[in-house]
Image (cartoon, rainbow, N blue to C red):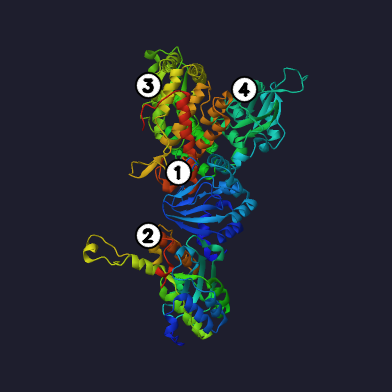
Amino acid sequence: MSDNQPLPDTIKSLPWPEQYKALSESAQAPVLKAFYEAGCVSENTPVSEVAMVALDFETTGLDAEAHSIVSIGLVPFTLDAVLLNQAKHWIVRPRLPLHQTSVTFHGITHADISDAPDLSEILEEVFASLNGRIPVVHYRHIERPFLNVALQYRLDEGIRFPLIDTMAIEAYLHPDRQPSFFKRLVGGEPISIRLGDSRKRYGLPHYAAHNALVDAIATAELLQAQIQHHFSPQTPIGDLWL
Amino acid sequence: MQAELIDIRNHLIQHAPFDEMPEELVNELTANIEISYVRAGTQITETGQTSTRMYYVRSGAVEIFRRSGELYNRIGEGEIFGQFGLLMRGQVRFPARALEDSLLYRITAETFHYLFENDENFADFVEIEDRSRLRSAVSRREKSNALMTSRVNRLISRETVSAPTTVRLQEAARIMTDQGVSALLLMDEECGGTCDRERLVGIITDRDLRTRAVTEALPSETPVSDIMTTGLITIRASSYVFEAMLTMLHNNVHHLPVIDGDEVRGVIALADIVRYESQSSLYLVSNIFHQQDVKALKKISKDVRDSFVRMVNEDANSHMIGSAMAGIGRSFTQRLLELGEEKLGPPPVPYCFMALGSMARDEQLVVTDQDNAMILDNSFVPEEHDEYFLALAKFVSDGLAQCGYTYCTGDIMATNPKWRQPLKVWRDYFTDWIENPKAVALLNSNIFFDLDGIYGRTEYAEELKALVAQKASSSQLFLTLMARNALNRTPPLGFFRTFVLEEDGKHQKTFNLKRRGTAPLSDLIRIHALASGSQAQNSFERLKSIGKTKLIMEDDLSNLRDALEFISIVRIRHQALALEAGEEPDNNVRPEDLSPFERSHLKDAFQVVSNAQKFLRFRYNSQATRHV
């Protein structure tokens, strides 16, 4: 998160529902005002009752300050169902030039983005899917900081929200991912908590394609599996979000 | 649909009924799917619940139960469940529970009904249950081969060319040349033109003119009736082209008069059929008869496998392929007998060369050994004649081995003196097998109950067929013991509708499609056919004649026919794939090498075999002697 517009610590330390309330009053941009006004569930809410949205960005690099968003995929879901009829995918024009290395990774080329809109043109649509839902990502250091920086840049104000990180859940479940010297001797292998490898542990299928939407769907499925294997539908959302 | 959802769509379209769904509909379906992960043991639907959706298993496995709690089915990747409750717009009919951690694609009632209204194939698929689905799988496959959908009358392109039997050779040749035909039908004139219709009595072909008239230097004034072929093999106008092909293959004729009721509609020739099947197995058959020695036969035997693969790729059904391969095998045998007689001189007494087992049933494939025997005339005197017949049998058997038909490991070949006997001895053999049956002895003589005379005095073989048909149906003990033997081999289906696997020679977990599928099926069909007094040898023909006796219900007969066709065609395809990959074909299949479509229909087919075996046990009061 950027500190261009420092928030008083009194607001930052509020529980998320109250924080949203306070932020809805201070936010200037209509999209952000509406986002906070849609509210946030209390931390005691069982995860089975929480509306969530799996979110994935493809970016030109890993540093939110230096790189840009190239595409956005999202799919609203609950513990019960991932709703493909509400799935969305956008390609956006990055502020910074595409690097060849990132092209080979996400497959989005210069031709794809030359006619693509700037993020500011699709913000309302994106937020229509985010409002009232708790975002779920795999690796929390991409989507939240990139969205924050992008909004700072375009609206002159950042964004704050809690999210669930399926990679953090895997990290928590597998604290000793690197096998000891002795374990390696007897064939122990390091445990990967990358999206595809994590999914494999739950018997989830391999997806051939890599785009923001497929990864968002894959993340939503992974969270459903994690909750059913290691938590319960009654687990309070406050135990899961970060 | 978002283009990014293509991964999900691509999974759907690999599986029925989505594989044949129009693209726009699959896209709409994909865009409306709900994905749900369930852990092993989760109850997905419960009896009495309102049905709100159908499910597609993306990964994992689900068990379906009857109301009674009894396991009904196990559903795996790419299969659907929950459709019946939706169709009745009511309650869950079969409760479902996750057997493994599963990812399910849920199809809402709204989407389901939309697909149901807009895709006939989808509607058909979800409406029918396993066994009827097997039927549509078989018929859908057969619809794609022109030989199986076109009727013989479409091949007739001209008026019938005929002449009275009284015309002379020269005149007959002139008519054929003028009309540009290769065969001339010969009509009886005995009613002196007073009756409306002439009677078809014979045929001569340009080959007859060449081989019989010209080479034997017959005077041109010879009446055609002297050289014409009588006892004609004909085909009905409403028959399918493939039936005409089978008839030609089986009888080694190149022309078939087409009959419609009493009326002769025309003649179809080999060339008419070859037009349908570009590189016909019929070509191979006629080619066999042009070879002058064993070496030349061996050379063209390499084409047999190509011919097999081609038929598989042209979507021929198992009856066509089995008959074509048997026809080819029969032709090799016949040609070898001709060559043998040329070498050894004419036989001292008449004889019949007999095919046994799959060749007699017209159900031969590419991996096959030779099973044959000789019926000698009753005037046979071993001391005087057997040296000749042993030499002939050995010539044929060695020749067949050269051409890829390996020696029979059970020594059921005419080279074995036991199976080279006069007709009266054969009558005693069969009488003894049927009237004094012993289970173990019957196990070894099973193969003799599929028999077909293929050369020489084939009427001897017909006599044996008649004897079997007459005696078998009235010997209860014989049928009971035959049934007991037939129950020794069971389909590879476990309690959970899973495949029961065995380790094959290559140490892979497989099941054997012949030993566990087609063989138990043809065994049980044989027994019902014997009980019905049928003389048919081919399993499909046997099913037809069983149907006439009402021994088995029409529905069960159709199920047996579909199961036999499906298992056979999977086995055939398995062998064709091996041949194309340059491997030696066998009958051992790994479940993972089958498509989900094949896996699911195979289970249905094996279920039919299993039910039919239960009926066989009940009907003939048999318990299996051992379980393999």
Secondary element at tag 1: helix
Residue that label 2 marks: A201
Q: Callout 1: residue from which chain?
A: B
Residue that label 1 marks: B574
Depth check: give the residue in front, B357 or B616. B616
Direction from residue B410 to residue B251 in the image, left or right: right
Residue that label 4 marks: B230
In primary-sequence order, the first of circles 1 and 3 is: 3
In primary-sequence order, the first of circles 4 and 1 is: 4
- Which x, y percent locates residue B468? 48, 19
Between label 4 and label 1, give the one nearer the viewer: 1
Amino acid type at circle 3 is: Ala
Vertical comparison of B154 with A89: above or below: above
Vertical comparison of B323 with B573: above or below: above
Confirm whether circles 1 and 3 share one chain.
Answer: yes
Amino acid type at circle 4 is: Thr
Vertical comparison of B616 with B381: above or below: below
- Which x, y percent locates residue B221? 67, 22
Real-space CA distance between mark 1 and mark 3, rounded to the nearest whole angstrom:
33 Å
Q: Callout 4: residue from which chain?
A: B
Between label 3 and label 4, give the one nearer the viewer: 3
Q: Residue at x 40, y 34 (%)?
A: B402
Real-space CA distance between mark 3 and mark 2, rounded to the nearest whole angstrom:
56 Å
Q: Callout 3: residue from which chain?
A: B
Between label 1 and label 3, give the one nearer the viewer: 3
- Which x, y percent locates residue B424? 44, 13
| Residue B148, picture quadrant | top right
Residue that label 3 marks: B441
Confirm whether circles 2 and 4 share one chain.
Answer: no
Real-space CA distance between mark 1 and mark 2, rounded to the nearest whole angstrom:
34 Å
Between label 3 and label 2, give the one nearer the viewer: 2
Secondary element at tag 2: helix
